[in-house]
Image: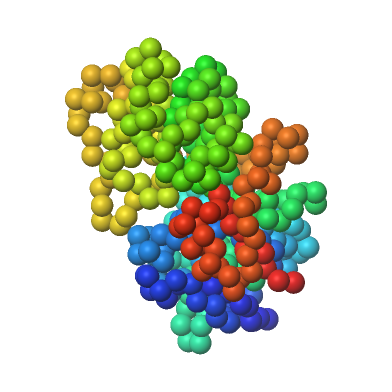
Amino acid sequence: MTITTRAAIARQPHTGWEIVDLALDEPKAHEVRVKFAAAGLCHSDDHITQGDAPVRLPIVGGHEGAGVVESVGPDVRRVRPGDRIVTSYIPACGACRPCSTGHQNMCVKGLNAGTGMFLDGTFRFHLGQEDLGGFCTVGSFSQYAVVSEWACIPLADDIPFEIGALVGCGVPTGWGSAVHAAGVRAGDTVVIYGAGGVGSNAVQGARYAGAKNVVVVDPVEFKRDMAKVFGATHTFADAKAAHDFVVETTWGQLADHAICTPGVLTGDVVSAAVQVVGKGGKVTITAVGKLGENAVTVHAGQMISYQRQVRGALFGDCNPLYDVPKLLGLYRSGDLKLDELVTRRYSLDEINQGYQDMADGKNIRGVVVHEG
């Protein structure tokens, strides 16, 4: 049966999010219909409204979500109606080449992230006669959505939905950028550029992995203060001050790692990151930049002379079916701070205010709490 759902959609860049009523189809084979309880306000969705994400418009926003399975389509085996779940913004089918070789973050069933189209070439959201997709084929800015069963990760009863929503993207992306992609080790010096929802978790990952110095660069004082809560040992408002400190504290050897997690990646950030790492150092790029701009332009001599590395990280190199439960286990034991990430909660009607607060540097992570 088709139902009506309230959702935030982006019609075109620079007009913000619009609240509308959409028709939502029943789930088809290997699909489930989810009643979302919470959705994280990730910067990636803001890239849509800023015109910096190559997506099919209009689109239902939201790719961090947690809720309850309302119904299932044919052949679904992973979950049942009534199950509490986290939606992984990249599905993990477990059978494709990336999944079967330990790289679930690159599952081939995530190929329609920018359109929200399902693998059969159809859509589940409809606005009149117009078909709409959900961002990353999730669409958690809707009260209800249809998602792939491969995007469903069980959520234990003792974990709040708003915490569950964050481990669908931001937490593993940041944590994994430090622990998996960068490979931070005990005693390392790590510089992290940008301390928002993703960067704060890169801080936590680096510290938990044993880094001696976790240096954060962020122009916003509130974020620098919060970075210390998450484990930063030193914070700076600008890259030069951080660089000077790293030179002094390492006796000129420079940092082992630089991790780029600002809201918008720029060439200046990448340049600073390359310069701050020493011999054999690695720069890990997690953030994305403006559409049409090349932020990564590095002189070959800088790479060769110190044998530096620059690499990208998708979902923090995490395997969601394994890493999401592991991270929630660390939350339970008090080793991972997730409650502190949620700066403010918003209703769906307040979503544009939530993104304005993010732009103003007032939030580490805002969360939409759906009614009912």
In the image shown, does 4 or 301 lie closer to the viewer? Answer: 301
Image quadrant holding the C terminus, namely bottom right
Quadrant assignment, res 312? top left
Task: Determine whether, in the image, residue 217 is placed left or right of residue 137.
Answer: left
Q: Quadrant of the N terminus?
A: bottom right
> Residue 95, position in %: x, y?
56, 46
In the current view of this chain or complex, which residue is farthest to the front?
221
Q: Residue at x 30, y 27 (%)?
A: 275
Residue farthest to the right, as pictured? 157
- In this rendering, the answer to whether 256 lies above or below 89 is above
* Relative image position of residue 78 (x, y in whole percent): 69, 54
Residue 251 picture location, percent across and down:
38, 12
Question: Is residue 183 left or right of 304 when viewed as pictured?
Answer: right
Can you say whether 247 is above or below 126 in the image?
A: above
Q: Is residue 197 visible?
A: yes
What residue sits 41% from the left and 63% below the top? 48
Measuring from the top left, give residue 197's x and y in whole percent.
54, 47
Side (left or right) of 372 relative to 231: right
Q: Quadrant of residue 247?
A: top left
Please name whichever residue, 225 or 331, is drawn nearer the observer in this view of the structure: 225
Q: Is residue 179 visible?
A: no
* Total labels drawn: 0
Extreme residue toward the bottom, this view: 128
From the viewer's side, name the closer residue of 207 and 1.
207
Quadrant housing residue 297: top left
Which residue is at 60% across, 27% downward?
A: 208
Looking at the picture, the colour scheme in use is rainbow
